Each structure stands twice: as C-alpha cells, then as structure tokens.
Amino acid sequence: MRASDLAEMTAQLVLTVALQLASAAIFVAIDASMDFGSALYHCIVTATTVGFGDVPNATQGGRLWACV
C-alpha cells in the first residue's frame, strides 16, 4: 500500500466520522427526545442501510432530516 493511498483512506475515514458526528448533533438539535448516543447510533445504522428501526424519529423535523 502506497503512502498516498493510506493518506486518502485516512482522509475519507475522518470525513465520514465528522459527517456522522455532525448529523447526530443536528438530530439532537431537532429532536429533543433523542440523546446524542441514540442519534449517533441512528446515523450509523441509517448510513450503512441496515435500518433496524429501533430508534424512531419522534418529530417531523427528525423525519425530514433523516430523509436528507
């Protein structure tokens, strides 16, 4: 593996983690009934298209953000 490949993969991982954390923070801001851990779990499960459905969106704003 070349150093440039490793750097690219690291950048992609950092971007993905940052996006998940930011999305979870937005969920918490939109839906007061959701804590950050549940919001982060929801984001990861949704991003991986598993979609267990065990963390529901309680508000219309949360549902709208989940669609984005």
Image (tube, rainbow, N blue to C red):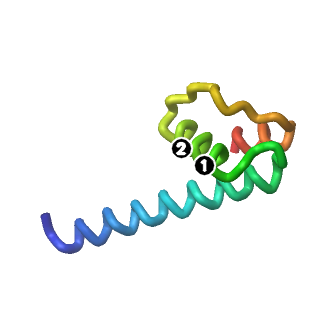
Q: Along the line of sight, which residue is nearer the eye, 37 or 46?
A: 37
Query: Would you identify the image quadrant in which residue 55 lies?
Result: top right
- Marks 1 & 2, CB-CB < 8 Å contact: yes
Q: Amino acid at mark 1?
A: Leu
Q: Label 1: which residue? A: 40
User: Residue 29: image x %, image y %?
Assistant: 80, 56
- Check disc 2 and report its element: helix, strand or loop: helix
Spatial distance from mark 1 to mark 2, Cα to Cα?
6 Å
Is 55 left, or right, of 14 in this rendering? right
Q: Percent x, y for residue 50?
A: 50, 29
Badge 2 amino acid: Ile
Mark 2, residue position = 44
**Compared with residue 56, is residue 34 higher up or lower down, i.e. above or below?**
below
At 40% from the left and 60% from the top, the residue drawn is 13
Q: Is residue 48 left or right of residue 37?
A: left
Residue sitting farthest toward the left:
1
Residue 28's disc number: none
Q: Residue at x 74, y 50 (%)?
A: 27
Instruction: Determine the residue positioned at 65% across, 43% down.
Output: 38
Q: Quadrant of residue 5?
A: bottom left
- Is residue 20 left or right of 56 when viewed as pictured? left
Q: Residues within 10 Å of mark 2 (few under 14, many from 20)?
A: some
Mark 1: few, some, or many residues within 10 Å (few <14, many ≥20)? many
Q: Which of the 4 image quarters holds residue 6?
A: bottom left
Quarter of the C terminus within the rendering? top right
The quadrant the N terminus occupies is bottom left
Picture coordinates of residue 36, whole percent (x, y): 67, 52
Residue at the (57%, 54%) spot, across then down: 20
Q: Position of residue 65 (x, y in %)?
A: 75, 45
Label 1 sits on a secondary structure element that is: helix
